[in-house]
Amino acid sequence: MSARFDPVPDDRFTFGLWTVGNPGRDPFGGPVRATMDPDHIVRGLAKVGAYGVNLHDDDLIPFGASARERDRLVAAFQQTLRDTGMVVPMATTNLFSQPIFKDGAFTANDPQVRAFALQKTMRAIDLGAELGAATYVFWGGREGTEADACRDPRTAWNRMRDAIDFLCGYVKDQGYGLRFALEAKPNEPRGDNYLPTTGHMLHFISTLEHHEMVGVNPEVAHEVMSGLSFPHAVAQAMACDKLFHIDLNGQKIGRYDQDLRFGSEDQKGAFLLIRLLEGTLGGKRYDGPRHFDAHAYRTEDEAGVWAFARGCMRTYKILHARAEAFDRDPEVRALLAEQPDAALDPLLAAGYSRGKADALGKLTIDVDAVARRGLGYERLDQLLLEHLLGVRGG
Ligand code: GCO
Ligand code: MN
Ligand code: MN
């Protein structure tokens, strides 16, 4: 295996404690691997070349631990971070594992559940800030329904907005420099999750009181579960400067949330995604951490877990190199540069004016000639595949 693609901290690859730490439990069977403690996970991640580690509150501090126990665990974790040079770029709250959250957290009908969810999240935000996180992720967990008559979905939406507005206020009041990143998922664990796609999230954000500090954390698997294009969701977030974080993994369409090794499924989607994130096609590059929210197959032992982690990072770097070669390829550039009507661009961009309307109104367009023109996309897509399959480009 070529060392050229070995991960180094400068690549800014991160993993959640819950990802490599996943013991292989599924709805049909218990754990197949021993639980790894946070110290062991962070040391393992540092060894395979990762840059940082992300966590839910409960990944580090068992639910219900005393304040003293909390402080002891946090101090020990900080020591591990110092020893390894690892950082914590993102933190989040577990609002789904405890029985109290069986009907959701911020959207639950019982006000005591909603109050507890806010209380738990404020503490978890304090923890994230203490560990130096720059981004705070909100994944809805159990915010959703099976028996949809249980509440007006508009009420759920308003409750979600109240919660995020409140927590933005809390972050500002505490003087933390954190930004929020909202993560959509269409279903699982609930039959229907609220705010199911990145597009829903982007609109929801525009309604928030402090919308400027809230962006999205799209996840490959979640958008693919909906049958949607993940690169398109990411592109929309990037176009409005809302890509604050990203969850990378692999997923087959139409399945349960598989959280597979990055790039292990839909390599073309992964290639197009990296082209966007790394800006090889032009435009602004994503500059946040590259976070893998995935876990090893249930067939694996601990060695398999580290092979999984290395695989995520290597595939990212390999695809990055492939994307660079593709976008440098003179034939690709020629195909993409073809803009026979470039003279019209000023008329078509930057909004309305009376003069533009007059000019457009008078324009003669040879409809048949335009319609007859072949666009060369077959060739373009074949070139993409040949780059992706490694038979073309450096
Ligand atoms: C899932 C989600 C989670 C979240 C994590 C951080 O489908 O389980 O992707 O892994 O990303 O809880 O919010
Ligand atoms: Mn995720
Ligand atoms: Mn997921």
Image (cartoon, helix red, strand yellow):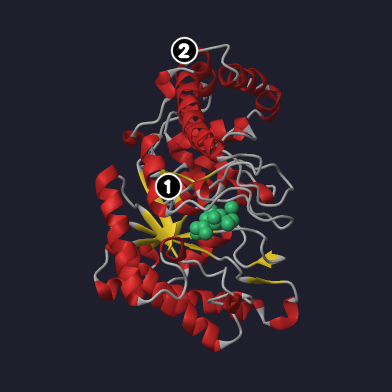
Q: Is residue 170 above or below residue 192?
A: below
Q: Which SS class for mark 2?
A: loop
Q: Residues within 10 Å of mark 2 (few under 14, many from 20)?
A: few
Horizontally, residue 361 falls left or right of residue 187, namely left
Foreground: 82 or 168? Answer: 82
Q: Is mark 2 within 8 Å of ligand 2?
A: no
Residue at 63 percent across and 41 percent down: it is 297
Q: Does the rendering let one see residue 241?
A: no
Residue at 59 percent across and 65 percent down: it is 195
In the image, residue 327 lies at what x, y percent?
47, 22
Q: Quadrant of residue 184?
A: bottom right
Determine which of the numbered discs, if any, sits on residue 250 in the image. none
Q: Is residue 365 above or below residue 25?
A: above
Q: Is residue 77 above or below residue 334?
A: below
Foreground: 11 or 337? Answer: 11
Residue at 28 percent across and 63 percent down: it is 130
Determine which of the numbered discs, if any, sits on residue 394 in the image. 2
Q: Which SS class for mark 1?
A: helix
Q: Is residue 16 above or below residue 93?
A: above
Distance of label 2 from label 1 (alpha carbons)? 35 Å
Residue at 36 percent across and 39 percent down: it is 46
Foreground: 60 or 136? Answer: 60
